[in-house]
Image (tube, rainbow, N blue to C red):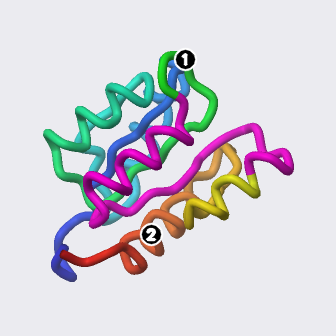
Amino acid sequence: MSADAPLRVVVVDDDDDFRLMLRVQLNLESGVEVVGTAVDGYEAIEVVGDEAPDAVAMDLLMPNLDGFAAIDRIRREQPEVGLVAYTAVAGRYARERVAAQGVELVLKSGDPTELVAALRRSVNNRVRP
């Protein structure tokens, strides 16, 4: 990602309304472009493979394949992609698990500022090929 290129993001959430809201909010942020969305971990892996984003905002609790498992798989298959866990559920288990995965956790809120900052940090900290 060059200094003047937008941060290319994939949004993953099983809630249709929330996914749409977050996509709109992030696209309104300067220097951010949502390049794809996914409804579960399986679709996230596919979209990340197709779109090669800079970063992913990943919900944790989803059907089929949850965010924890999707994070593990994306880390293995595409370690250059930044990952942020973005969730309303932030109990001890979730916090410890994402910390062990080396992923920052951000709580869902109406203001995307903290998420955008975390996505940018994830790109700065990602594994370079």
Q: What numbered label is drawn on residue 36?
A: none
Residue drawn at x 35%, y 63% is 30
Estimate how packed mark 2 is, as few (under 14), some (14 to 19) or many (20 or more) residues with alpha carbons within 10 Å.
many
Please say if 63 is above or below 92: above
Q: Quadrant of residue 46?
A: top left
Please say if 116 is above or below 42: below
Which callout, 1 or 2, points at the residue further toward the start of the chain? 1
Q: Amino acid at mark 1?
A: Pro
Residue drawn at x 52%, y 69% is 117
Residue drawn at x 56%, y 67% is 102
Q: Are marks 1 and 2 in contact (CB under 8 Å)?
A: no
Of badges 1 and 2, nearer the viewer stands: 1
Residue drawn at x 48%, y 25% is 65
Q: Amino acid at mark 2?
A: Ser
According to the image, label 1 marks what residue? 63
Please say if 99 is above or below 11: below
Residue at the farthest right position: 92
Please state the extent of the stretch shown in magenta in the rendering: 66-94
**Disc 2 secondary structure class:** helix
**Disc 1 secondary structure class:** loop
According to the image, label 2 marks what residue? 122
* 118 falls in the magenta region: no
Q: Which percent across, then down, holds residue 116?
A: 49, 62
Q: Nearer the viewer, residue 114 or 102?
A: 102
Q: Nearer the viewer, residue 2 or 64?
A: 64
Quarter holding the N terminus is bottom left
